[in-house]
Amino acid sequence: MYSLMSSSPSISSSSSSFLGQTHFDSRTPNARLPTKDSWICKCVATPPTETTAHMTKVSRNANMAKLQAGYLFPEIARRRSAHMLKYPDAQVISLGIGDTTEPIPEVITSGMAKKANALSTLEGYSGYGAEQGENRLRAAIASTYYGDLSIEESDIFVSDGAKSDISRLQVMFGSNVTMAVQDPSYPAYVDSSVILGQTGQFQKDVEKYGNIEYMKCNPENGFFPDLSTVSRTDIIFFCSPNNPTGNAATREQLTRLVQFAKDNGSILVYDSAYAMYISDDSPRSIFEIPGAKEVAIEVSSFSKYAGFTGVRLGWTVVPKELLYSDGFPVAKDFNRIVCTTFNGASNISQAGGLACLSPEGLEAMHKVVGFYQENTNIIMETFTSLGFSVYGGKNAPYVWVHFPGQSSWDVFSEILEKTHVVTTPGSGFGPAGDGFIRVSAFGHRGNVLEACKRFKQLYK
Ligand SMILES: Cc1ncc(COP(=O)(O)O)c(C=O)c1O
């Protein structure tokens, strides 16, 4: 039997709680920081007398029970809320979660507004659309992002975001595959793998799930795994530019990765959610690498380019050339999954996507990306001037700062306590992230400048 301690503030599974003071009423006078024990959410065995709730006869999915504590960002949200209770007058600045902050350019919102208004007319109304997305949008994504790479409109599946597609892909692969991830990496790959039953139990001593191949990426190997030590898996998740390290793999490295997947008969799931942040000649798509269509799927998103984290729009490319061991096209199965689990992205979001890909929309997206890149430079310069080893930043909106020999959660706590700035502890992305914190460049300029001023005071 399990219960959540009743005095703990609600723990949202949604990262949106991160942005606001949703866990307490700030107008309530005499708000007090609960005692340490009372705000820690623990699963505890409850004495039978306390249990009055009806229990069903449904047993819990054992894979869900394998998941650790909570998803990283709700845990950070919880600590932030506790901090705000402790310091109700502090101006807390969040450079933690990778959520965008700047308004969506007008050229894009007006495309959505036009569609929304048209829905009130007989001529402009539309209901369910194609599960795979509107053809016009699929064609626009193919020509804009994959210009001369021979990716066809029919290879593209429009979605409500990359995160959902990561889970849809996992549902398609099923429980009997093995998988590899970069360590550190965006937590959704590992957690979805656990939920699907692809892994063993979490092993506390090494902070890893059994049956997942963790591909260590650190400054020593230039944030690219030593493939000679990586065991064969069916699926390889690879994100470039990487969240959280901010590192983008080079053409030569991706060529080796594609060859590795080919040699092993693996499928590469390549996450290019930050590709527009690349400022050097690193590939923006895995399909720039010859032969990739036979081994790779690419997931991507409008979230970080156009401020669509709330609007929700992404896409996945599954080339026709990608086949299972029996010769069956992966795209056909993905189509079936999409048609079964999804009824298509919102028609208003898709109108926004089309506006993003108009010449004016593209220019506006580049401006948004440019604004965050300037923030990134400010953060990088700050930590560099303080003598830290700083990584990422150049091709991504994330700065990865090294605190050798220290635990990332300790560093996170110290920064929060002394500067009221929320960052993200590197170990939340995998064991190789310990000793680092991720500082996000998503923030209003004034907040980024203020946060950097406080970092300088703390570490001068
Ligand atoms: C690497 C990576 N992939 C996917 C996502 C999720 O994107 P979306 O908003 O499209 O679901 C994120 C969000 O932070 C991310 O960092």
Image (spheres, rainbow, N blue to C red):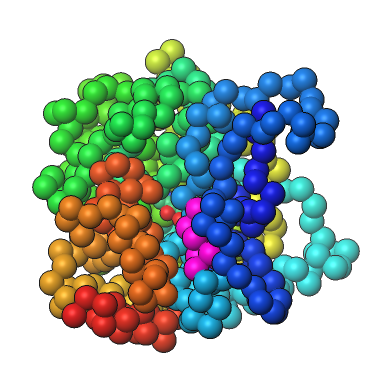
Q: Residue 334, located in which quarter of the rendered image? A: top right
- Is 436 situated above or below 416? above
In the image as oriented, which residue stretches furthest toward the top? 326
Give the percent coordinates (x, y) of residue 2. Answer: 65, 33
The magenta-colored residue range is 75-83
**In the image, is 324 to the left or to the right of 388?**
right
**Along the viewing direction, whichever of 124 and 278 lies nearer the viewer:** 278
Residue at position x 62%, y 25% in the image:
61
**Along the viewing direction, whichever of 341 and 386 lies nearer the viewer:** 386
Give the percent coordinates (x, y) of residue 59. Answer: 69, 21
- Is 106 situated above or below 60? below
Residue 210 in sight from this viewpoint: yes
> Could you tell me what secondary structure mostly forms the magenta stretch?
helix
**In the image, is 111 to the left or to the right of 299?**
right
**In the image, is 128 to the left or to the right of 9?**
right
**In the image, is 120 to the left or to the right of 110?**
right
**Along the viewing direction, whichever of 445 and 163 lies nearer the viewer:** 445
Quadrant where the N terminus is found in the figure: top right
As for residue 80 lying within the magenta part, the answer is yes
Residue at position x 66%, y 77% in the image:
30
Q: Residue 23, located in which quarter of the rendered image? A: bottom right
Quadrant where the C terminus is found in the figure: bottom left
As for residue 2 lying within the magenta part, the answer is no
